[in-house]
Image (cartoon, grey):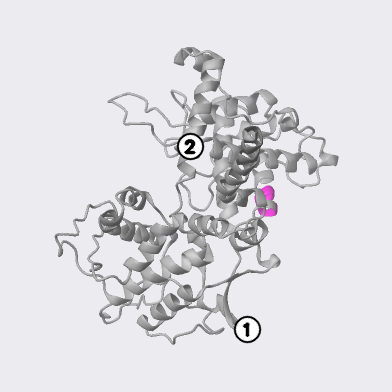
Amino acid sequence: MKASFSSAGNALPPVPAHLQGVPGTQRAVSSANALGVDSDHEAIVVWLNTRAKNAHTRKAYLQELRRFMAFMLYLRGRPVSSATLGDLEAFRVWLAVPYLPAEGWPADFMPFKPDGAAGDGQTPRLRGLSIGSRRRADTTIRSFFRFLHEGGYLAANPCMKLGRLTGEEISHDELEKLQLSPERYARQRRQEAIALDNQDQGKAFSIALWRWLRGFLDSDENTWQIPDSPGLANDPTEPGQARCWPQERRERLRCILLFGYAAASRRAELTETMMNAIVRSGQRWVWKVIGKGRTATDGPDRVTLDDQALDALIRYRLARGLPGHPSPDEGQTPLIAKLTPKRVRPNHALKTGQGVTAGYLNTELQRFFSYAAPFAARQNPDWAPILRQAASHWLRHTRGSHFALGQVSLAMTAEHLRHKDPRTTSKYYVHLDDEARGGAIDSISRLLDEN
């Protein structure tokens, strides 16, 4: 197979002939093979085509498969179809405490982020994955081997004897390096889990901060002189440090902010949406979206928009020279588009109307959040650091949190956020659960205090 880690056309790693998996030790007899494939690479392609029809799901699965294949091929020296229970246990440890071999590793593939800068001639330390990322990797690999086993490509599924991922996996060698006992290491990981959970609770704007941020769009102190770099400090007492955004860009930001919040949208969903996906339903306007975990055959989910989102959309459309409301024939008009060029050069293709990327949308929001931070600090000093670390996905988390605070049912919130598993939605209700438990505790306290 001719492939490279850096290849855009084929994201799988290059596999030497003797590691193609044709003689894999876990292979089933050919008569039981319902997949109709003869190598690990072909089996992976069939799995992706069958289980990852959505582009975003396919990208996520490929990322995990690339990492697992690289581990098996270049660290264990065996094909994927020869993976054993021991290999899977070692893979879990590797995700938490990664390392690369001294030689033989593909130079154009780095599956982990560096943990600090490396000195001259030194191998860079790598940062292990968070427990959430390791769980995603574990779930993906389990699904992959279950598919190969059920399809008759593998005689046995090595994952069947694999225990639950605890997040505390580590090798004895690594424990010796860290000079920690297993108990001390487990305690350390649990402290890290608590710290991580504390961070997750903060990825949403409070009611007060969101109300202020929404009002800041039209406040007199907002001059829209926003630096191009999201992280560039901006002193609101010294205007003129950046060029004032044109009207179209301002209205686009308003639409991203208010529409993204109201629809609890993922940034990729926003950038892929065309105007014909926004339709009138009775007296309401709804957004039709086929997002994460859905396919075209499932049909779109329907998300009801509020008046502020619709008003922001109308203002943005008018700034682009479009009629106020979307129409069903605008299937080629992106919801969030590049800015209209100020002038058109002869014999040069006009870029008006092309959609922006998900990364650009996120950066544009971060520019605005960083710009607003010093102004927010005048109202509440705690708001500035929150805004400086905020990103596009905060709008979705904020909507979920506000649904919970508004006593909206868990089922309705799950439907609005388009969660397949209500347990994903329940994290927004943790504070309400704390209050409910608090009520039970108070009732016992009152009982004990009675004379």
Label 2 neighbour load within 10 Å: few <14, some 14-19, many 20+: some
Q: Is residue 207 above or below residue 137?
A: below
User: What amino acid is at disc 1?
Assistant: Gly
Mark closest to the chain's N terminus, 1 or 2: 2
Left or right of 254? Residue 192 is right
Say whether residue 427 is magenta: no
Secondary structure mostly taken by the magenta-highlighted segment of the chain: helix
Please say whether residue 234 is visible from this viewpoint: yes
- Residue 109 x/y as whole percent: 45, 39
For this orientation, the residue located farthest to the right is 31
- Residue 151 x/y as whole percent: 79, 44
Q: Is residue 377 above or below residue 161?
A: below
Residue sitting at x 26%, y 70%:
245
Query: Label 2, on which residue?
Result: 196
- Which element is circle 2 on? helix
Classify the position of the N terminus by image quarter.
Answer: top right
Asked whether 11 or 36 is in front, the reply is 11
For the record, the magenta segment spans 46-50
User: What amino acid is at disc 2?
Assistant: Leu
Query: Label 1, on which residue?
Result: 282
- Which element is circle 1 on? loop
How far apart are the alpha carbons under marks 1 and 2?
44 Å
Please say whether residue 271 is visible from this viewpoint: no
